[in-house]
Amino acid sequence: MMMEERRARIVEMLKSERTVKVNSLVEEFNVSIETIRRDLEFLEERDFLKRVYGGAVRKGAFSDEPAYDLREVKNLEAKRAIAAEAAALISDGDTVLFDIGTTCLEVARLLSDRTGITIITNSFMIAKELAGSRCRVFVLGGQLRGGELSLSGFLTSEALEHFNADKAIIGAGGITLDRGITDYHPEEAAVRRLMIEHSKYSIVVADSSKFGVVAMNAVSTLKEIGILVTDSQIPKEIRQGLRKTAVPTITVDV
């Protein structure tokens, strides 16, 4: 493949996937890391992308959330491995606040046969998944957003004020070392913040594609969460940064 074709392909990948990783591009095009880094530098100079740790994000990615049906199948193996680790942190009898998102949904699926767990969620997807299970499920009110089938807004926040939980399962639109956890929708970011505040222990579940991405709305710093569960594909620089900031982290091999 010619250099121009490779760079055009990277731009096309960013249009559909929003983020690209250096290691993945090396495998995709069978070229060296240095070649990919030169490609990303070239494309950044021409305003096609912004380089981040371990890869690049499309310009404007912080305000553009990928469609739910694309997120549902992307990195599914990693999400299921992350979900298994997160589910193991939940004990029978726990009360758990459940955020929206595809990885949170995978965690919920692993709890259907568990005993005595109370779920409080703003996700119709999760409520539907656990209907008929052994879990007791409370659905928070609020304004419905299509696609995600999430509930948010002042009614959701008001309802959350009446609950306290042992744990919270929290998703993320983006994660960086300096900005922490961010989200695309202000109302849903507010709900995430409240879930962290109203739980004794928050568990953030996020696959490696979320790292290096800054969404528009701040949720929390990394120091404010209980533990981060992610996969082994996160860039080396971020892994080192997490160790330096002493953020408890579980990394699953994928």
Image: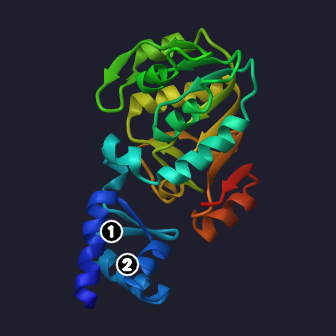
Coordinates of residue 112 in the picture (x, y in percent): 59, 24
Coordinates of residue 249 in the picture (x, y in percent): 71, 51
Residue at label 2?
40
Which residue occupies 74% across, 49% down? 248
Coordinates of residue 88 in the picture (x, y in percent): 72, 37
Locate the N terminus by quadrant: bottom left
Residue at label 1?
49
Callout 2 amino acid = Leu
Check whether the beta carbons of the residues at disc 1 and disc 2 lie within 8 A of each other.
yes
Between the C-alphas of marks 1 and 2, the distance is 8 Å
Q: Is residue 180 visible?
A: no
Coordinates of residue 179 in the picture (x, y in percent): 54, 51
| Residue 171 vertical placement versus 213 (above, below) | above
Callout 1 amino acid = Leu
| Residue 219 vertical placement versus 191 (above, below) | below
Q: Is residue 148 visible?
A: yes
- Which of 113 and 182 lies nearest the eye of the viewer? 113
